[in-house]
């Protein structure tokens, strides 16, 4: 049986704020050590975006700020956060377009804010 794959172009979405759902989070070894890889579905665009954050317990760290946005509330000092339980939660992502050295463009999530809906 022949394996046939139809090529498609993957162009970045325009810069803006989009409602996203966290579809996965995993601990990975990255170029900066242990990191969380966040996978989001951009609900109104049908696109998938990934982002990375350090693993830090600081309330100012990206992972705690994003967890707070997905929970829709502030995280208090001393509180334990189950990041796996965040999967399925929604938030508003500030998405930007960035350019690689080769001139191609890609999307990056600049910030995550609590969901307005």
Image (cartoon, helix red, strand yellow):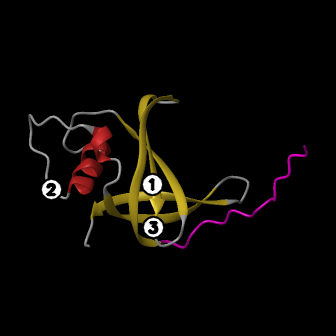
The rendered magenta stretch, by its main secondary structure, is classed as loop
What distance separates the C-alpha of mark 3 from that of mark 2?
A: 21 Å
Q: Secondary structure at mark 3?
A: loop
Q: Secondary structure at mark 1?
A: strand
Which residue is tagged 3? 43
Q: Secondary structure at mark 2?
A: loop
- Residue 9 shown in magenta: yes
Q: Earlier in the sequence, mark 2 or mark 1?
A: 1
Image depth: mark 3 or mark 2 in front: 3
What distance separates the C-alpha of mark 2 from that of mark 1?
A: 19 Å
Q: Residue at x 42, y 33 (%)?
A: 35
The quadrant of the rendering that contains the N terminus is top right
Front one among 16 and 79:
79
Task: Please give the range of residues in magenta.
Answer: 1-15
The quadrant of the rendering that contains the C terminus is bottom left
Give the vertical position of 23 relative to 116 (above or below): above
Q: Locate residue 11, reporting x and y percent.
A: 66, 66
Pointer 2 and pointer 1: residues touching (CB < 8 Å)? no
Q: Locate residue 3, reporting x and y percent.
A: 86, 46
Left or right of 102: which side holds 92? left
Q: Residue 88: which numbered mark, if any?
A: none
Which residue is tagged 2? 73
Front one among 64 and 47:
47
Q: Residue at x 65, y 54 (%)?
A: 100
Number of numbered markers? 3
Front one among 76 and 5:
5
Q: Residues within 10 Å of mark 2 (few under 14, many from 20)?
A: few
Left or right of 88: which side holds 8? right
Q: Earlier in the sequence, mark 3 or mark 2?
A: 3
Residue located farthest toward the front when viewing the structure as drawn: 1
Question: Can you tell which quarter of the image residue 91 is in?
Answer: bottom left
Q: Residue 40: which numbered mark, if any?
A: 1
């Amino acid at each position: 049986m022949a394996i046939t794959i139809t090529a498609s172009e993957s162009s970045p979405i325009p810069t803006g704020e989009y409602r996203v759902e966290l579809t996965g989070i995993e601990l990975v070894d990255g170029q900066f050590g242990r990191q969380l890889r966040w996978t989001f579905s951009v609900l109104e665009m049908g696109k998938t975006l990934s982002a990375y954050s350090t693993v830090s317990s600081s309330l100012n760290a990206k992972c705690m700020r994003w967890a707070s946005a997905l929970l829709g509330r502030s995280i208090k000092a001393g509180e334990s956060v189950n990041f796996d339980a965040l999967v399925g939660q929604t938030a508003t992502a500030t998405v930007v377009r960035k350019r690689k050295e080769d001139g191609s463009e890609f999307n990056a999530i600049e910030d995550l804010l609590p969901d307005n809906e």
